[in-house]
Image (cartoon, rainbow, N blue to C red):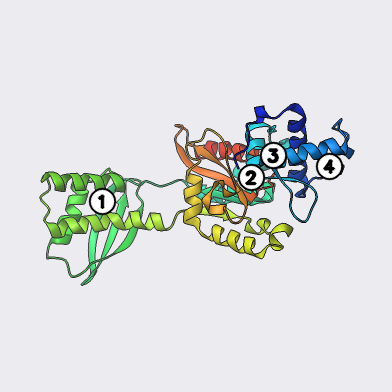
Amino acid sequence: MASLPISDLNDRAREVFRLVVEGYLSTGQPVGSKALAGGGGLNLSPASIRSVLADLERIGLLAAPHTSAGRMPTESGLRLFVDGMMQVAEPTKEERAVIESRLSEPGPIEAALEATSAILSDLSACAGVVMVPRRESRISQLSLVPISDNRVLAVLVGSDGSVENRIVELSGPPRSGALEEASNYITAHLSGKTLVEAARAMHADLTSGRSALDSASSDLVARGLAVWSEDAANRPVLIVRGQANLLDESAISDIERVRSLIEDLESKQSIAELLDLAREARSARIFIGSENRLFALSGSSVIASPFHDRNGSVVGVVGVIGPTRLNYARVVPMVDYTAQSLGKLIG
């Protein structure tokens, strides 16, 4: 059921709703009318509070678990609270100090990325995730070397001096001279391009008739370029730390949710695709429960924020995975601050 905009709630309903959500996010337990009346913040009788709670449940913002007379926010209610009512605080001085000190430790950028996921996990008591910057190495040279009748070693030298090797499977032995022709074509015509740009340029050459390559050599070029693209798609570079934090008491009491959550976390390709949705956001983006297909069954939320290089280009995403009852007001600015700190480090 679609929830109403926050402006459609009267002051009384808005205040009751806020107290229920804040109480639930703080304790993880449904909030009852007695607790609301006893808190002293509402000038309403328990009967009036129960009436407001029933109205909020009727319009889809609250739900009453069968094991409790109290109410808890639905996913629609959490979304309404996050977008329209949540007061976001700055990270504390201590949190900023932890983030800055651990990211300033000497070492390669890979170590900083590992540290980032661990920092977010430790500070949020959830799982910390970092999608490593995508490397789009530009081709300096690509050589194809035969190693058997139907296997070729592709050696890619990047413009940054990096060297990578991949095995290319062929349907049969290549024509004599085809490997040399393919290697020379790549170096002469595709040097300086990324793999994606090189594949497009080769396709344009072939379709326009500008390429002198025959079908055997052009097939070798295509296979040599494709092996890297396929490899990158099948193995997204993602760092996840603190998965054990997600196995809280509520998760342990629901074995199916635990199983679903573990399967979700093992599907790194799916997590990378979800984080990729936050690449164009200006600040942290929040995905609540079934709003994202990946965590629809396990009832988890994701807070993700992009980080940029010195030119303002997005190079990756950091985030936190936790239960839907996350302390969003605290975790959102923490994720944003960590993304900003990591961006400064990368430059």
- Which amino acid does the dot numbered 4 rest on? Ser
Q: Residue visible at 37% across and 46% down?
A: 136
Tell us which disc is closer to us: 1 or 2: 2
Tell us which disc is closer to us: 3 or 1: 3
Q: CA distance from mark 3 to mark 2?
A: 19 Å
Q: Nearer the viewer, residue 78 or 160?
A: 78
- Element carrying mark 4: helix
- Which amino acid does the dot numbered 1 rest on? Gln
Which picture quadrant has residue 18? top right
- Please give left or right for residue 323 compared with residue 278 in the image: right
Tell us which disc is closer to us: 3 or 4: 4
Quadrant where the N terminus sits is top right
Q: Position of residue 161 (x, y in %)?
A: 34, 49
State which tag comes first along the sequence, 1 or 2: 2
- Please give left or right for residue 287 compared with residue 38 in the image: left
Q: CA distance from mark 3 to mark 1?
A: 49 Å
Residue labelled with disc 1: 141
Q: CA distance from mark 1 to mark 2?
A: 52 Å
